[in-house]
Amino acid sequence: MDPSHPAHPAHPDAIHVPATAAPSLDGASAPLWQHQLSLLMESTGEGIFGVDLAGHCIFINRSGARMLGFEPHEVHGRNMHALTHHSHADGAPYADTDCPIFNAFRQGLPCRIDSEVFWRRDGSAFAVEYSSYPIIDGQQVCGAVVTFTDITKRKREAAALQRANDELELRVAGRTGELTAALGQLRELSAYLDKVREDERTRIAREVHDELGSLLVALKMDVNWLDKRLSEQAARSPQEADTVRSGLRSKCQGMSRMIETAVQNVGRIITDLRPSILDHQGLWAALEWQAQEFVQSAELALDWQMELDSAVELPEAAAIAVFRIFQEMLSNVGRHACASRIAIHIGVSGAHGAQLLRLSVADNGVGAAAAAFEAATAYGVMGMRERARHFGGEIAIHSAPGHGAQFSLTLPVPP
């Protein structure tokens, strides 16, 4: 055994070569298998080269040489580590003692690496995936064979895919944050609406108890008084009977007034719950009635402008939504604006079948910064927007401190 050739146990991935064959009878100097192997190496698109125990190139195919920027004859006999594997991707020196290619014949360790670079003749580097396996002749390691391929495109595509994934994760995270915030706002709005509903129920219950209840109790007492006086009527003298009849008439008149008051109170409570004018005369009359009621109670000057065809109608659900949005717009003016005048404009624009209802309420009050209407606690604005969005509409708000505010509703009119 030649001591200059280290002996290693046969590795399952090692490449074994047959003993040198004798020349053929026709005088050919190379055995047939070598010719076929040469054809095979030249027909592949991957780079293939072999090194001896000193790391010098003993063969390289044309594809491999061209990937390195050489012709095959220019590479033969040169140290492959010094030629193409001398540095890391960052330019730091790469010692041949750390080189996995050389370890294939020094330690009999095959490898497959896709995280390093090879260097071209012009000094540029390219990402490479390579495999190195020891060549075993009998029991002797006589070198290594290396296959490699340029994976620059694959790395670029992988980097692009990673960037896309990172961007997608950021977008998903951002959208998740937006949805979480929106869900939180909807929960707060739902809680606010529940509170408003309970407050309204409490108010109605208080009015029924304080006003209707007291009237009904008074009427019950008066009825009992009448019943008692009538039951005593037969035992009275004619003069006493005349006096009692006068008192009965007076009591009946008082009861009539209480009943009239009760009817008015019931009508007012019913109107607060749902104005009957909305059912009897339609949305446009209800809006004008509500505007007149508001400016009278708030002592404001009104600029009223309604420009629409009386034939224009909205479905009942949409009409109720418009009316409630209008009420909330007026309520905002009453609570926050400190205004002396409001301007209301209602109109329909567009051709038949593609019409838009436009309703605006503008005041000359104190106004507010835009952020005030976008705050998480601006439940009234949030409720208006949700109502409008449900029917394909939108709410626009224009306001500035000291310059009043304008609330505008735009809503499609179904054909």
Image (spheres, rainbow, N blue to C red):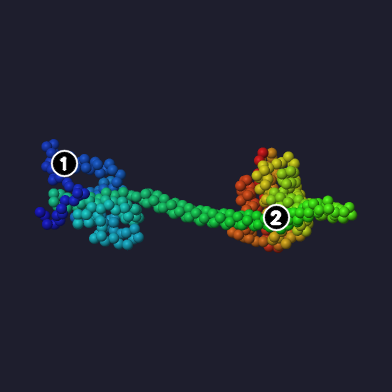
Which numbered disc, 1 or 2, marks the residue that appears first in the sequence? 1
Q: In the image, which disc is placed on residue 31?
A: 1
Q: Identify which residue is drawn at 71% across, 58% down.
A: 210
Q: Identify which residue is drawn at 46% across, 52% down.
A: 168
Dot 2 crowding, Cα within 10 Å, few <14, some 14–19, many 20+? some
Dot 1 crowding, Cα within 10 Å, few <14, some 14–19, many 20+? few
- Residue at the outermost right position: 239
Q: Look at label 2 and name its amino acid.
A: Val
Lateral position of residue 414 relative to residue 131, left or right: right
Q: Look at label 1 and name its amino acid.
A: Pro
- Residue at the outermost front position: 235
Which quarter shows the N terminus?
Answer: bottom left
Q: Secondary structure at mark 2?
A: helix
The location of residue 355, given as percent across then percent down, is 68, 42
Q: Nearer the viewer, mark 1 or mark 2?
A: 2
Name the residue that disc number 2 marks: 208
Q: In the image, which disc is placed on residue 316?
A: none
